[in-house]
Image: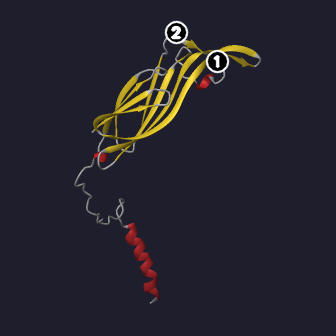
């Protein structure tokens, strides 16, 4: 009896060692595939056009395609009307300003579009706006010296609204009078 007990572990080890290098294949029983019987407006991509009309930050337009629950960032940088506004590297906050390759201050508008589409095809949209633009020059004291540095107009606002996704447009008036028009087309 003692012999049989000792031989069983050896037989199991020999059996495992005799397996092919790829290992043991065990048949798997997968669940049946899930099929979608009807598509909802939230399932597909939607083409959004964002158009900005602003005396301070300029006019711009762009069209992108995203799905429900995704976000998209629209960024426009333009030269302000009149001459370029050169910024001294000694001006406070010069690193946070939107500058062109020559160190001149630009107008900049950033819009983040975050839509969520409901089963009925309407989109609940969150629109986040960040904008800046030069607004003249001001005397600024830096380390006891007076410098001419640009004044900067800024805008930061979040707006939420609901709109159809059938090509209709929705216009939102921001606090400074800037108009943002959004259209959505499935």
Above/below status of 143 relative to 1:
above
- The way the protein has been coloured in the rendering is secondary structure
Secondary structure under the numbered disc 1 in the rendered image: loop
- 140 to the left or right of 40: right
Q: Residue furthest top?
A: 83
* Quarter of the figure with residue 64: top left
- 64 to the left or right of 36: right
* Labels 1 and 2: the sequence-earlier one: 2
Above/below status of 29 relative to 113:
below
- Of the 4 image quadrants, the one containing the N terminus is bottom left
User: Residue drawn 25% across and 50% down?
Assistant: 39
Can you give x and y, in whole percent of width and height, for residue 32 in the image?
25, 62
User: Residue drawn 72% across and 19% down?
Assistant: 142
- 143 to the left or right of 182: right
Return the mark for residue 83. 2
Q: Residue furthest left?
A: 37
Can you give x and y, in whole percent of width and height, for residue 186 in the image?
27, 39
Secondary structure under the numbered disc 2 in the rendered image: loop
Marks 1/2: CA–CA distance:
19 Å
- 132 to the left or right of 183: right
Above/below status of 132 relative to 104:
below
User: Residue drawn 36% across and 33% down?
Assistant: 182
Return the mark for residue 89. 1
């Amino acid at each position: 009896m003692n012999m049989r007990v000792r031989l069983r572990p050896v037989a199991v080890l020999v059996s495992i060692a005799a397996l092919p290098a790829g290992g043991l294949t065990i048949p798997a029983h997968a669940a049946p595939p899930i099929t979608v019987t009807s598509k909802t407006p939230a399932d597909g991509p939607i083409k959004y056009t964002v158009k900005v009309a602003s005396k301070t930050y300029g006019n711009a337009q762009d069209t992108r395609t995203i799905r429900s629950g995704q976000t998209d960032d629209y960024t426009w940088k333009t030269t302000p009307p009149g001459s370029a506004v050169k910024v001294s590297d000694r001006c406070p906050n010069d690193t946070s300003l939107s500058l062109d390759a020559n160190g001149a201050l630009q107008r900049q508008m950033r819009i983040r579009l975050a839509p969520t589409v409901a089963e009925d095809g309407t989109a609940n949209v969150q629109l986040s706006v960040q904008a800046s633009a030069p607004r003249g020059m001001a005397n600024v004291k830096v380390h006891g010296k007076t410098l001419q540095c640009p004044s900067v107009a800024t805008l930061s606002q979040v707006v939420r609204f609901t709109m159809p996704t059938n090509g209709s447009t929705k216009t939102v008036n921001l606090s400074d009078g800037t108009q943002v028009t959004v259209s959505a087309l499935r």
